[in-house]
Amino acid sequence: MKAKKQNQTKKKMKPWLKAILIFVAVNLVIALPLMGVIEVLVLKGKGHKPSDMDYRGYISREYGIDMDAYEEKYHMEQIMIPSTKTDGYEIPVFTYETTEEYRGFVVVSHGMNSNHEMIYPETEAFLKAGFDVVSFDQRKCGLSTATYVSYGYYEGEDVVDVLTWALSEYPEGRVGLWGQSMGGAAVENTMDEAVVKENVDFVVLDCPMGAMDELTGAPAFQNRVASVFNKWMVGYSFDEQSPYAQIRDNNIPVLLILAGDEKVIPSVSIDQIKQILTDAPGECVVYTKDGAGHADVWLEDPEEYDKQVKEFTDSLDAK
């Protein structure tokens, strides 16, 4: 009997070893989805961006835009708007005036690892078409003091705040939303909000992001675990970040701009967004630029990009 007890004792795992194994297992489950996100968003992102995040220099070199002249031409002004959902947080907002006859304004949202300056080329299409532009730095980007990005979740709340502010500041006219990549998810996440449904006349989505669990490329179980930890640590789950439910009943005309050589947003996300918006009550116009990479549609064909925006916004006046 004594020997049997000794054998059983030998088979028991040491408490400290068990703790280490549990710690390693849990961290693997959490880390693998996060590694997938890093691989998609960072390693597969635009490799030609400068490592020092010199946006002004990058835009000047790659797009041939004189930043100072641009801001002077369109009378750029900067203000801070308090967030209504995040205590103590202020949104850095930048406004630009069209040089054409005023037709309305557009609230624009840039992508991840970017700032308000990086979207000067794309959003100038609206300025040329007669719309004032209201831009802002997404969380943890540019002048934002936020400590993390949320892949369109909290950024969507900022879109609503900026839109609400602009509605009280600008004359009557057409109201639009434009979002690129993560900024696209931010805009998508607002499309079931009352202030958007009641006031926004059109939406332009440029290479928009979809659901987080598709972006990670991780197995479903790992995504579920990561989602729980995400909710615990930063306040939202992967399901809450997903914009699909918000766009499903959309009744606003949408121009969906896609890159033919997309390597950042998974094809399953692009297909989901396209299908949902096509099936929704609102009109959806799809423009795909063959050969263009993620968020590089304008760079691939600037004239066609401007033309697509102009024709889409002009079509609203004919209805």
Image (cartoon, rainbow, N blue to C red):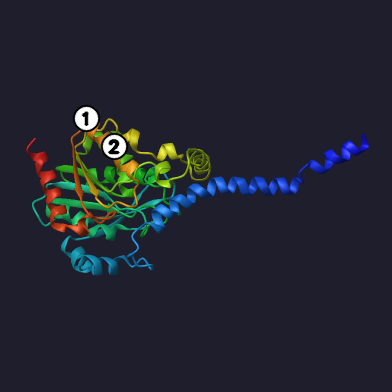
Q: Is residue 319 left or right of residue 165?
A: left
Foreground: 44 or 199? 44
Residue 54 against residue 98 in the figure, above or below: below
Q: Residue 186 in the image: state x and y as whole percent.
A: 33, 44
Q: Residue 93 in the image: state x and y as whole percent.
A: 30, 54
Q: Residue at x 29, y 67 (%)?
A: 58
Q: Amino acid at mark 2?
A: Met
Mark identifier at residue 181 = none
Is any atom of residue 160 visible in this view? no
For mark 2, give the secondary structure. Answer: loop
Q: Nearer the viewer, mark 2 or mark 1?
A: 1
Residue 216 against residue 220 in the figure, above or below: below
Look at the image and tell me in which quarter the N terminus lies.
Answer: top right
Mark identifier at residue 191 = 2
Q: Is residue 52 left or right of residue 295?
A: right
Task: Of the two numbered discs 2 and 1 on the same chain, state the one appearing first in sequence.
Answer: 2
Q: Is residue 238 left or right of residue 192?
A: right
Foreground: 141 or 308? 308
Is any atom of residue 202 visible in this view? yes
**Residue count near mark 1 (Cα–Cα under 10 Å), binned few <14, some 14–19, many ≥20:** some
Q: Amino acid at mark 1?
A: Pro
Q: Disc 2 and disc 1: Cα gap in Å? A: 13 Å
| Tag 1 residue | 281
Quadrant in the rendering for residue 167: top left
Q: Residue at x 29, y 37 (%)?
A: 191
Q: Residue at x 18, y 47 (%)?
A: 105
Q: Residue 260 in the image: state x and y as whole percent.
A: 24, 50
Q: Residue at x 32, y 58 (%)?
A: 115
